[in-house]
Image (spheres, rainbow, N blue to C red):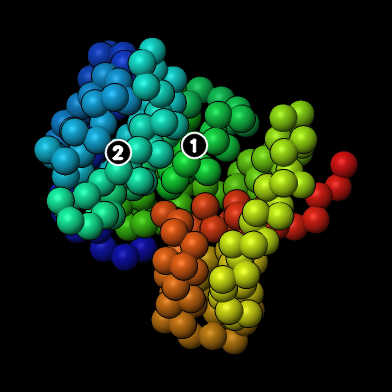
Amino acid sequence: MEAVKAPVRVLLVDDDALVRAGLRLMLSGGGDIEVVGEADDGSQVVAAVAEHRPDVVLMDVRMPGVDGIAATEQLRTGLSDGTHRVPGPQVLVLTTFDADATVVRALRAGAAGYLLKHTDPARIVEAVRRAALGEPVLSPSVARALMDRAAGVDPVERSEAPTRRDRARARLALLTDRERDVAEAVTEGLSNAEIADRLFMSMGTVKAHVSSALTKLDLSGRIQLALLTHDARDFEA
């Protein structure tokens, strides 16, 4: 893994003060992570990000006011330096369910991944470091399971899939053939090194194609690219 710029600045967003206290204690033991701020509702997130400039937001999904999904969408679309949109921090959503449909919605909203609240502390610390590097915090198997759920296991998702497929195909038409090849490989959960080996590219070329695809499609990360590419595939009832 590449070196992480230290310290990684983290904003905690959870309506439970005890959870925030536990996360702060846990992350402070990492040595290279600094909790720079806290919020207890999604309505406070945009202002807190503007004030504290975190690298990573550790975001609860379910809060009584504005939930984590809506707050994630606000971060993706609502940050500005006064003149232009500026990149927001990486968002890791927190949930107690590893296959909840709300997780899929959070990923579509722009989250870099998710963590279960009972995850081993060392894994949470490592996930924060990975998120700061822009790496999706999902194993390939979990990513595929979540995308399969989005493709039709849930009745609402199933009914919406054909329309979503058509929209996804229209957006992906903006990509070159090679960018589309790379996007398909990302959907399979392959790393940059694995994509380079499969498509006979250099690592730098793979990264350039991923970056170009994200820019053209106005996506925040590899997970969103994978979900969009998955949506474009033929739907089978």
Q: Which residue is mark 1?
A: 106
Examine the rendered structure and indicate whether residue 152 appears above or below residue 16: below
Q: Residue at x 72, y 30 (%)?
A: 156
Q: Quick one: 230 or 136, which is closer to the camera? A: 230
Local SS, label 2:
strand
Quick one: label 2 or label 1, which is nearer the N terminus?
A: 2
Examine the rendered structure and indicate whether residue 212 appears above or below residue 96: below
Q: Quadrant of the N terminus?
A: bottom left
Local SS, label 1:
helix
Left or right of 51? Residue 42 is right
Q: Residue at x 60, y 28 (%)?
A: 100
- The reply to whether residue 186 is in sight is yes
Mark toward the viewer: 2 or 1:
1
> Measured from the top left, where is residue 101 in percent x and y?
61, 30
Give how far apart the Cα atoms at labels 2 and 1 are: 13 Å
Residue type beneath disc 2 = Val
Q: Which residue is mark 2?
A: 57
State yes or no: discs 2 and 1 in contact (Cβ < 8 Å): no
> Measured from the top left, where is residue 65 in percent x and y?
36, 16
Q: Quadrant of residue 36?
A: top left
Q: Quadrant of residue 93?
A: top left
Q: Quick one: 3 or 206, which is closer to the camera? A: 206
Residue type beneath disc 1 = Ala
